[in-house]
Image: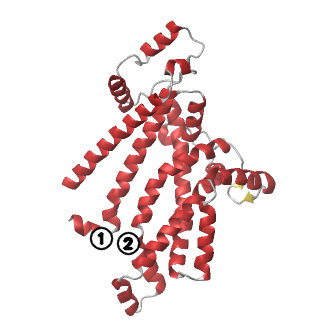
Amino acid sequence: MRNIARRLFQLVLVVVLSTLFAFSLLRLFPGDISDAVLPLGTKQQKQQFREDNGLDKPFFAQYATWLGNLVQGDLGKDYQSNTEVSKKLEAALPVSLQLMLYAQILALLVAIPLGVLTAYRANTKTDRSLNAGAFALLALPSFVLALALSYFVGVKWQPDIPWLGQIPVTGYEPGWLEPLFGQPSGDIGKHFGTLLLPAIALAAGLIAVYMRLLRSDMIATLQENYITMARAKGLSDRRILWRHALRPSSLTLLTVAGLNFGTLIGGAVAVEVIFQIPGMGTLIYQAINARQFVELQSYIAIIAIGYVLLNFVIDSLYVVIDPRIRRAHA
């Protein structure tokens, strides 16, 4: 219980600091927010805007008001369309969550077998070839791969995949997560089709990272005494690799997978814009273009809170995955 209480305290502290950072960041831009929002407005209109949005109050009073509203689900309004930001977020959040989830699942499904294979075949032609491919993927930015996929797969080749049909280049079909946010669901086959290319573009770099990490940890694990004992007992290589070596070798992979959600969000901004997917990345892009600073700081804060919560959950899973850590906390 003491360990859980300590982690919860750290969680709250990190959330407060991350939201304070998000709030402070946009105030470092030169000029006044009212000038950016109302470039042609009169002095009286700009002053009225500042008073209506509490921008005339001291910094920490503004932060306390904004954080209090954020906790209650009030993220403010879009100044141009007068639309509540929370409504826009409800529509965009499930889209990005599904895209990032598919990218992570795809990356892990490809990287784990390759990581195990390269560890088992370490320093062979197979290992060297797969590592060369991994380095090539690492050097390829997600937006470049997104542009290449949209042209070759979506325009030039136009493959017809069973259950998914012809892969669309742009657009989005709602999936299974939208109903949880009060949105209507769509055709599941079309949903997977619309997110296939964006998920591949986001997952490519992750596959290389995960494969390399798992390979290194697996090679070290395969040198452990209990693995030697398992071999002496006559256990098959497949059983040793997948049952006895993979689990303790996956802690670093799990940690990096959690941390990479931040990378995914950054990559999703470009990928969502390229494939015209109405997710968080597109909202952030539109908010930056329209200089919707208050809206943008709410998005950054929501992403930071989600990122911290996810890593808290992953940190808690360590004791489930590795018995050595569970015994150390007992």
Location of the C terminus (image quadrant): bottom left
Say whether disc 1 or disc 2 marks the residue closer to the N-terminus. Answer: 2
Q: Is residue 123 above or below residue 156?
A: below
Q: Would you identify the image quadrant in which residue 65 lies?
A: top left
Residue wearing tag 2: 248
x, y percent for residue 150: 72, 51
Mark 1 and mark 2 residues within 8 Å of each other at the beta carbon: no
Q: Would you identify the image quadrant in which residue 76 lies?
A: top left
Q: Dot 1, how many residues are within 10 Å of its Cα: few (below 14), some (14-19), or many (20+)?
A: few
x, y percent for residue 22: 42, 35
Residue sitting at 54 percent across and 40 percent down? 280
Q: Is residue 119 above or below residue 180?
A: below
Residue sitting at 47 percent across and 70 percent down? 214
Residue wearing tag 1: 323
The image's colour scheme reads secondary structure
Instruction: Provide the secondary structure element on which disc 1 rests.
Output: helix
Whether residue 176 appears in this view of the structure is no
